[in-house]
Amino acid sequence: MIVKREKINNMEDCHKYLYEFKEDKFIINFFQSGNRDLYFNCLCSEYLKEINIEITKSDYLLYNCFDELYNEIIYEIQKKYHDSIVIKEYYQKLIKNDEIIWESDDVACEAELNDGNKIYNFLIISKQEDKYILNFINNSHRKNFSISFNTDRSKYGSFVYPFMTLVRNLEDATEENHQITIDEWSYQKKLIK
């Protein structure tokens, strides 16, 4: 898996990089669009119902970005807002069996079934041992699909903010000449032994 940065626009108040996860059958772009919302765009060479990406500790900086996201949603926000009824409602929709299950804030391309129910794509983030699994679920009938995070009107309220932090953290994690941290050095030493 490759993560790279590319300039996508020059708007001063919008994150200026796009992050790309690339495999043989798909490319997943993660970026902030001009409307300030975040998107995972899944561009596939063929129709895929699910796309799975594993992020292991061997890709230490990327792993830490998702570790911070996961911990912020699973532990920190719950701890900070455990008495808030509104936060509990959002949290109960978002967390199931220690998995983050993000229903896209935008409907899938087909928008509605005949019975009036809306169709959504999903991102499921689960933690297993020393890795994170990102599972992108395509509920549309198109090979290319997206999962959106509305920054000002998300159905999950303030739980969208850790994803904003993820965008900023990815900038540092993909920096070619980053300074190694003591944690990263310790982990690499442990792998050598």
Image (cartoon, rainbow, N blue to C red):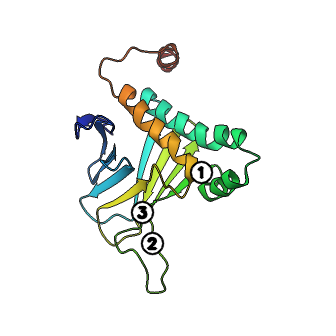
Residue 109 placement (x, y as % from top left): 34, 70
The residue singled out by tag 3 in the image is 106
Q: Is residue 56 visible?
A: no
Reading the image, the residue beneath label 1 is 99
Task: Give the mark nearest the N terminus, 2 or 3.
Answer: 3
Find the distance from the CA under tag 1 to the CA under tag 3: 21 Å
Residue in view at x 36 percent, y 58 percent: 146
Nearest to N terminus: mark 1 or mark 3: 1
Image-quadrant location for residue 147: bottom left
User: Alpha-carbon distance for marks 2 and 3?
Assistant: 9 Å
Q: Residues within 10 Å of mark 3 (few under 14, many from 20)?
A: some
Is residue 190 toward the left or the right of residue 44 in the image?
right
Query: 63 or 128: which is nearer to us?
Result: 63
Is any part of residue 139 visible from this angle? yes
Amino acid at circle 1? Glu
Examine the rendered structure and indicate whether residue 76 appears above or below residue 24: above
Q: Secondary structure at mark 1?
A: strand
Which residue in the rendered view is the most extreme toward the right? 83
Left or right for 96, reference 68:
right
For the N terminus, give its image quadrant.
Answer: top left
Q: Measured from the top left, where is residue 182 in percent x and y?
A: 51, 13
Q: Position of residue 72 (x, y in %)?
A: 59, 38
Q: Residue at x 27, y 54 (%)?
A: 25
Give how far across and how far down residue 79 sits, in percent: 72, 39
Query: Secondary structure under badge 3?
Result: loop
Q: SS for tag 2?
A: loop
